[in-house]
Amino acid sequence: MVNSNLRKTCSIIIATVSTIGIAACSTTAIQSTKYSQDTLPDSVKVPTGNQVAIETVGIGEITYECRNKANGAEGMEWAFVGPKAVLNDRTGKEIGNYYGPPATWASKDGSKITGTQVAVAPSGAGNLPYQLVKANPATGSGQMTGVTYIQRVALKGGVAPVSACGEANKGSREVVKYQADYIFWKAI
């Protein structure tokens, strides 16, 4: 009887240790995945001396308005008004928002940043371009403190509407859905 109970207990311990070992291996594999800029155009790569601090997925919308073309050019066009997106971490947990103008990334911890666009590069038909932004110093203290650059990558949608824009609908607005990864970098 004692040997039988001992065997059952040992079997449970071995099964538990095996499960923990598998979970540890799985967690290690996930954590060892490192963000890479290798496939990005050089113009939107973050300079050496910075490392990834936060990886987010922005899911939201961009508003466009039918207006006269900029710089006195003749005709009408869909002009960018501003973005509005929720920023989730890689596990899907909401950690902040992105909105504008001006382009602002705000963390739920109260810290936020704005920035100046450095470069854009095509990312594929029907998608917003890749973007590199140099961050201004953060306001508030939290995870946005010390961010030096923001990259917009892994884009889906967000381009100006394909519907007509003319005198008949001047001033009308259209909202376009989009998704993008926003990668936040800090100096090493």
Image (cartoon, rainbow, N blue to C red):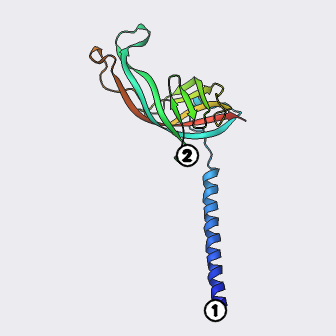
| Closer to viewer: mark 1 or mark 2 | 1
Pointer 2 residue: 90
CA distance for labels 1 and 2: 50 Å
Labelled disc at residue 60: none
Quadrant in the picture for residue 64: top left
Image quadrant of residue 131? top right
Q: Which mark is residue 1?
A: 1
Q: Position of residue 145 (x, y in %)?
A: 67, 32
Q: x and y percent of residue 116 in the render?
A: 59, 22
Instruction: Point out the residue furthest to the left here.
Output: 168
Residue 70 in the image, given as x and y percentages of width and height: 42, 12
Whether residue 185 appears in this view of the structure is yes
Mark 2 closeness class: few <14, some 14–19, many ≥20 residues within 10 Å: few
Q: Residue at x 37, y 15 (%)?
A: 67
159 shown above or below 179 = above
As shown in the figure, which amino acid type bears the numbered disc 1? Met
